[in-house]
Image: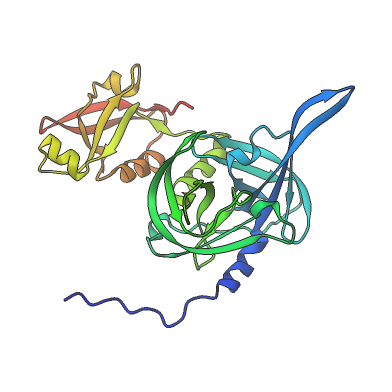
Amino acid sequence: MRVPRPIAATLPSVAEVVEAVRPSVVNITTRVETGSFLFRRFGATGNGTGAIIHPDGYVVTNFHVVHGANRIVVTTDDGGHFDATIIGTDPVTDLAVLQIEGDGPFPALPFAPPDSVRVGDWAIAIGNALGLPGGPSVTLGVVGAIDRSLTTQQQSLTDLIQTDAAINEGNSGGPLVDLNGEVIGINTAVVRGAQGMGFSVSSFTVVPVVQSILQYGRVRWPWMGVGISDITAPIALQMDLEDRRGVLIGRVWPNSPAQDAGIESGDILINIGGHDIVSLRALQRVMREELEVGEEVLAVFLREGQPIELLVTLDEMPR
């Protein structure tokens, strides 16, 4: 008989969490020039949200919030107004890093360990919903799912946290935090017509994207040039696989490191660079944290049930 875990008698006060987090949540106003006439420039303005993640004034937000902006103004919770510059962007993950042009230190939010996020955990979304005056809006919900993928008219996003905490226009780029006040995701998308479904880019993706932008000014991840998927039950049944470890190579890009190494569609990757691969997420973690662009690594595959070893020279992921 399964014995349920005891439930804590009290939960942290949401109001106290919000009070602690608010100083690190900023309003982002952008201006995009649309043309000029008789020496006068015309432009459109936009609004979004950002989260301060470093005392030096680094702010993470969505790429679509600042895309094409000629001027960016950050308004802090205490009413301060600062110009901001773009340090780097990554359209693939819809993330951008700005820096506030002002004297710090600024109050920064910590990130939660990505593996700590569970379906059913409470989640608090904070942001500049609809650009309304009077401070940020706060909504409360739960983590409905993790590792979601979503295709919109503009892009395809992966590694998303699904939540029923209301996310509206203007919330984009704001933090999704847990009851410890730690960032578990950056709010990025709303599905029109869906009830109670918003999506945030998981800290599992946000943290390495930010680190790469701060180091290189862009996202610089190692790349093999393959399309990969987890080995699900239907795939295992279709391929008559008794062992479901590893990830399935579905496609090999032409003129890629994978093609040069002799990797084939249908191969199953089980180890790379000495790291066992049990899932797509595990492979992403190894590629982002353990391996480097230009590194030659030994990869172990199963091909028709037999192990083979191939040397792969990793390239930089094309953008």
Q: How is the image coloured?
A: rainbow
Regarding residue 77, the answer to whether it shows in the image is yes
Regarding residue 273, the answer to whether it shows in the image is no
**Image point 77% across, 48% down: which residue?**
82
Q: Residue 279: where, in percent of width, then height? A: 27, 44
Q: Residue furthest front?
A: 193
* Front-most of residues 187 and 25: 187
Q: Residue furthest right?
A: 38
Q: Residue 194: where, in percent of width, then height? A: 47, 50
**Image point 38% across, 30% down: which residue?**
223
Q: Residue 9: where, in percent of width, then height? A: 42, 83
Left or right of 158 in this view: 73: right
* Front-most of residues 265 and 111: 265
Q: How many marks?
A: 0
Left or right of 254 in this view: 264: left
Q: Residue 128: where, in percent of width, then height? A: 66, 54
* Front-most of residues 222 and 90: 90
Left or right of 82 in this view: 259: left
Q: Is residue 22 above or below residue 213?
A: below
Q: Is residue 21 above or below residue 70?
A: below
Q: Residue furthest top?
A: 255
- Name which quarter of the figure residue 289 lies in: top left
Q: Quadrant of the N terminus?
A: bottom left
